Amino acid sequence: MRREVRGRLRILSAGLLAVALLLVVRLYFVQIVHGHEFSLRADRQYISSSQALFDRGSIYFTDKSGALLSAATLGTGFTLSINPSQITDAEATYAKLAAFTPIDKTAFLASAAKKTDPYEVVAKEVPTDAGAAIQAAKITGVTVTLERWRTYPAASRAAQSVGFIAFDNDNTLAGRFGLERYYNDVLDRAAGGLFGNFFAELFANLDNVVVDARQARQGDLITTIDPVVQEKLDQVLAATNAQYSSQETGGIIMNPKTGEIIAMDSYPSFDANDFAHGDPAHFGNPLVEHQYEFGSIMKPLTMTAGLDAGVIMPDSTYTDTGCVTVNKQTFCNYDLKARGPGTPMQQILSQSLNVGAAFIAGKLGHERFRTYFEHLGFGVETGIDLPSEARGNIQNIKTSPRDIEYDTASFGQGIAETPVQMIKALGALANNGAVVTPHLVKAIRLQNGVTKTLSWGKPEQVFSPTAASETTTMLVQVVDTKLANGKDKIPDLSVAAKTGTAQIAGPGGKYAPGLYFHSFMGYFPASDPKYIILLYTRQPQGVQYASETLTEPFMTLTHFLINYYVVPPDRGGAPH
């Protein structure tokens, strides 16, 4: 009997202990984890309980030390409203309020004249000190309500990637562009509230530390964007666009081994804090939404496909005729000159020879050429975590049996890609032949402080490491001897790079004279690449070739990254 009683007492004690532990944990969440949040809500309920306090997860940049810097967060302040029926002297009331915070006098007097309306908002986003002072003044007919709103400390930096929130057709405040839209369900805290999320938070750390990006749980976004690198990229893009009066200039800096995007933007852009006065044409992200014919930066991929398939060797040669007519269409080298018999593979990249690239495409054959390009990710979405991604267009090599389509595709004409597709494919050259998924968010920080690292899948091996290395060696030779006639060679660090100049189709689908799309890609250190850069500028004025417009911006960014990340040398030579 005593044993049975002791057993029951032990069960009861265990139950009481469990309840006590649960209460302690809950108290920890209320006072420590969400203490500031509950305090704000309590203050607002005391002032006005007409609406819920706006809440949304934050978006963070990550610098090289791992420190987090706000890209999108919540601003706190007051909304100032009046009850016109209680205001007997509008001029005097305005004077009292204007002493604390700027208010449009004409709009205030118009609101004060609406005696039948009990509620008129006269100012929003009033700073907390001014709002508190107005509240303490107890002005008749005046009410201050604690509010929060979305604010973007980075302003125009990476604005097309971060996006912004706005009201949709259902009058719901939600992400409209960029990460704000793509991860809206993760950032949105309207459903459930703090109490509703308690058990989810309590047991969240029992899940795997690494989760699939598509199963991200509610919380803050921790991005791969480095704010320092992002600012430098934006400066370079704006300067390049202005120098050549281009229609658009863009760039991506990525880790080719992980797919982490360190910086990404295009110019012109907009200020996310003032998007109402921005150009809606710039709200979307051209780097994922627009597709272009990239030109000769496609040649390294054609070269690597030929090497990987074994149809050419690094020391192979061909007869360069300068121009070739295929299916009644003629294409030529950029200078219309023939290099003659015995032209080596290196010169296809060093001199950017269209006839040479087409030679490799012919050796590969239609099916093999198309298969390589499909596995590189052309014609499909990359899976980047941004909305409205375009697929690109490689229909010419998917549906046409004509050789001309494959010949032109080999040097980057006749097929179109998004910039993010292009850097994904080119990243294979810097990653031992494997492609990765470009992405901007690396982790979700839950509201309980637990951080979940996102998984972006395994790399797909497209080329052999040997083939990728052989092409890299050729591209280093391009920088060391041909780019700016070798003047931009870095003696103690190897850089692999290639320029691209493509014609732009005009009305009727025919290439328009004088309209060009310039591109530039490069990665370093070539022996073990850590960074790959893709730049482009659309319709630059007064210049024809990408080597004229983008070489200096590329080298500026390269030297900046080397110094900022303290990249060690990978070959002997004078200090850079």
Image: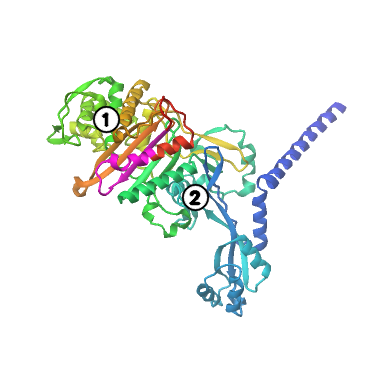
SS at badge 1: helix
Q: Nearer the viewer, mark 2 or mark 1?
A: 1
Of residue 15 and residue 297, the one placed in the foreground of this image is: 297
SS at badge 2: loop
Of residue 2 and residue 550, the one placed in the foreground of this image is: 550
Q: Position of residue 182 (x, y in %)?
A: 46, 45
Question: Mark 1 sits on what residue?
Answer: 350
Q: Residue 250 occupies which quadrant of the picture?
A: top left
**10 Å crowding of disc 1: few (<14), some (14-19), many (20+):** some
- Residue type at mark 2? Ala
Q: Is residue 411 left or right of residue 149?
A: left
Going by the picture, which residue comes out furthest to the bottom? 88
Residues in magenta? 531-555
- Is residue 342 in the magenta section? no
Q: Position of residue 90 (x, y in %)?
A: 58, 78
- Compared to residue 55, the image places residue 490 above or below, namely above
Going by the picture, which residue comes out furthest to the front? 574
Identified at 65% across, 39% down, the residue is 202
Question: Mark 2 sits on what residue?
Answer: 154
- Compared to residue 311, the image places residue 59 above or below, namely below
- Is residue 534 in the magenta section? yes
Q: Which mark is residue 246?
A: none
